[in-house]
Amino acid sequence: MATILVVAEQANGHLKKASLAALAAAKQLASKTGGQLAGALIGAGAGQAAQELAGYGVPVHAVEGAGLEHALAETHSAAAAEVAKKLGASEIVIAATAYGKDIAPRVAARLGAGLASDVLAIVSGNQFKRAMWAGNAIATVEVTTPVKVVTVRATEFAPPEKGQGAGTVTPAQVPAPQAKTKFVEFNEVKSARPELTEARVVVSGGRGTKGDFKPIEQLADVLNAAVGASRAVVDAGWQPNDLQVGQTGKVVAPQLYIAAGISGAIQHLAGMKGSKTIVAINKDAEAPIFQVADYGLVADLFKALPEMADAVKKLG
Amino acid sequence: MKILVTIKRVEDYESKIKVKPDNSWIVTDGVNYRANPFDEIAVEEALRLRDSNMPSEVVVVSVGPAAAAAEIRSGLAMGADRGILVKHDAFVDSDGVARVLKALIDKEKPDIVLMGKQAVDVDDNVAGQLLAEYLGWGQATFASKKESLESAEEKAKKPGIKLGADKKSAQVAREVDGGLEVLEVQLPAIVTVDLRLNVPRYASLPNIMKAKKKPIAEMTPQQLAVDVTPKVKVVKVEPPPQRAAGVKVPDVQTLVQKLRSEAKVI
């Protein structure tokens, strides 16, 4: 029986949440192909994170060793491809995070596989839906090669429930190539707020804030929300790069997305259209953002957001 | 140094994208075309690297239809030295593009290859990584920089990619989940660029005139002995699901009530 390999992601021994979305997608794929699931974790801490993934009833191969300490695309893709070859995997599923996007194409090249990237839905064993033109069109693509690599958009696949039994964890040794790349440093962006792509609630501000994000941040604090921004805000230097929601920034799909002072350029909509409930607050009643909003409020955000923060506080 | 940059001809992101009634592709009539915005950032970075490391050369390459010569010309008008168009009218998947570029790079032997991290038509974000693996090179994807786009470094048009003293390596800051990672890549290498690496320049009128005289070599995938039959075919294109029209609420109190009792999200 063919194997579907989930290449999961971890940091310091902790499994990344997006990897569970990849597992969910792999399970859907298995229901179409009849394949069996396996997992792989690579790098320092892989063994510990593998225990967590195995908790979902999947056998997991943990690859640790010299040259794999840092998540370099060259070495990690080589390790993933080696595990895939050993298992005779016919499909390799990876979450389309920065790590997944970095390594998946190299895994595909090593295996002679076709790659469907940033997949939204599994149509069949070889057909996948994905967004193109900033989400203005949804394409069904067919991967024609015997071995297939699929990266999946984590917000589109709900993490699976933990099953009864746990899978086994097998330490694996694979030869890692000599990397032509060296890790120098990582500058973490520290924030007390939840991560943008993982938050249940996101409050985003646009040009209408005129650079003053206090009302956005105050409402975000009350709702335990992440803060986002439109491209205009980031380009103006009002907020850091990593807050940008949109086609060229982060794609988010929280339970609640509040867009304040954002007009709703196609670019921005592509990054948040998948949210469950969208609220738009804008002074301009004609702003395109209202066309995608479940609840629209024509108001000045500097009045409406503090009022909303108070009202939410009173709800307790 | 020889710096190779790729430019893709894509639909203008300001154009209204509509799906064809037969679901085969999007309507292209009446759509404006332009250079992929990420590729313009790559061209800008290439020019800054060249100008701070003379003598150097910037070669812009496009894989696409004959009309893509216009996008190469736009790169030349920004200041690149010469162009290469690998002409192919039909759809080429990212893997095909990567293999065409590999064949070309084997001939051109650049010291560094700069590419947009993704083209805003198919939004694939894979060609650079595939190319790096096919060449056996290192890669730094999603290149950004620590300095902001408002910084003095940016205003002075300094390259965000820092070449080593011996020009055998480069340090690249990458935009990854949760922060910026700095890698040192041994050259030659592939660097794919993200939005915050730089602000691309506009072509000046004299440079647009000069660009008309710059050479663009033409070739085909066949001449490079590359079979561009796609590994990934587009079988259907559909419009995205439409969101049901929402309601306007009169005030904040109503909004909060509805979010609590109707949407049940707070």
Image (cartoon, rainbow, N blue to C red):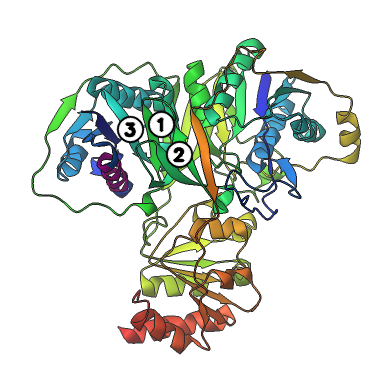
Q: Residues within 10 Å of mark 3 (few under 14, many from 20)?
A: many
Name the residue rendered at 35%, 76% in the picture.
B266
Q: Are marks 2 and 3 on the same chain?
A: yes
Identify the mark nearer the N-term, 3 or 1.
Answer: 3
Mark 2 and 3 residues: CB-CB less than 8 Å, in contact? no
Q: Which residue is mark 2?
A: A117
Type of residue at label 3? Ile
View extreme (left): residue: A165
Q: CA distance from mark 1 to mark 2?
A: 12 Å
Type of residue at label 1? Ile
Identify the mark nearer the N-term, 2 or 3.
Answer: 3
Question: Which percent across, then down, holds residue B55?
Answer: 75, 18
Q: Are marks 1 and 2 on the same chain?
A: yes
Q: Which corner quadrant of the image does residue B210 belong to?
A: top right
Q: Is residue A68 visible in this depiction of the protein? A: no
Q: Which residue is mark 1?
A: A103
Name the residue rendered at 35%, 74% in the picture.
B265
Mark 3 and 1 residues: CB-CB less than 8 Å, in contact? no
Q: Residue under mark 2: which chain is it in? A: A
Q: Is residue A242 magenta?
A: no
| In the depicted structure, whether residue A119 falls above or below residue B170 | below
Of A83 and B88, which appears nearest the observer?
B88
Give the SS element for disc 3.
strand
Q: Which residue is mark 3?
A: A92
